[in-house]
Image: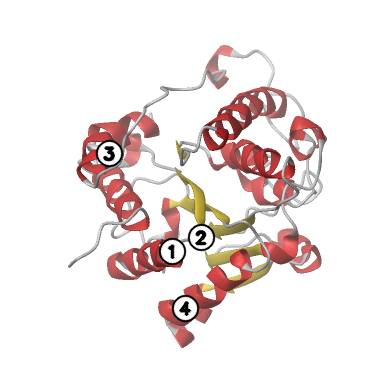
Amino acid sequence: MGPSAVRVAGLGRRLAALGYSVTDLGNIDVAQAESLADEGPSNAKYVTQIAESCEKLARLVADSLAGHQTPLVLGGDHSIAAGTVAGVADYLRSSGKQAGLLWIDAHADMNTPASSPSGNVHGMPLACCVGHGPAELVNLLGFAPKVNPAKVALVGIRDVDELERGELRSAGVQAFTMRDIDERGMRDVMRDAIAIASKDTAGFHLSLDLDFVDPEFAPGVGTPVRGGATYREAHLAMEMICDSNKILSMEVVEVNPVIDQFNRTAELAVELILSALGKKIL
């Protein structure tokens, strides 16, 4: 329901007002948990169905880039990022290039089936992108890893599982916590994060989880965590991404209208997308 809420908030119309030619490819078919008799392995629930959906997504993303378009993916569950990033990486491989990855989130998403306390795959997609995690997702489209961990910047984390900390430290991903943002300010953190994701790459994919923003401003997310970015800090991050001219593709995830308030979180998602894609105050 997340993508529908973002559409209702006027995403297509408002992107068109910025001068973009917008093509909405609709929704990818995703198996619904309530219709399935078996959730699969307890340490990676529904991984087979998630991998099938991610492969469809990866091919659409790669085709979009090949058609000189900018993919903008809407979710739902952050596990879709395994598919989005696979598509970007697959497109660039044909020309010997690689993508950076800018992951903005309250959570590290670096769990594996061995470390996850819940078995929920939406806590594993970043690990999958750097070559760790369920084989069905790690090896999407027949290659791994999808990104070099040294080209990954993780911004805004404030809720990391105990065993996940070890996964994050050993992976080589550069993480900037909310304490870093508190001490250094969003501007300095984003400057460094963009530099990491841009160095010796063709550009970067932006994976934006709305729970990066404090629940005061984004209540409609699956796993809210207090102490997140303010409304203006979030916009500054997106504006700096736009100014870098390095963004190749973007996804915005974890919009959950069931627990939202008057579609506030979907409205914020649209506003942040617009800032990342060029809307300015003056």
Q: In x, y percent, where is residue 265?
A: 30, 47
Mark 1 or 3, nearer chain start:
3
Mark 2 or 3, nearer chain start:
3
Q: Are marks 4 and 2 in contact (CB under 8 Å)?
A: no
Q: Amino acid at mark 1?
A: Ile
Q: Are marks 1 and 2 in contact (CB under 8 Å)?
A: yes
Mark 3 or 4, nearer chain start:
3
Residue occupying image coordinates x 61% and y 64% = 197
Split into 4 quadrants, where in the image is the C terminus?
bottom left
Camera-near label (3 vs 4) is 3
Mark 4 or 2, nearer chain start:
4
Q: Nearer the viewer, residue 114 or 135?
A: 135
Q: In x, y percent, where is residue 179?
A: 51, 79
Question: Label 1 belongs to which residue?
Answer: 241
Q: Are marks 1 and 3 in contact (CB under 8 Å)?
A: no
CA–CA distance in space, label 1 to label 2: 7 Å
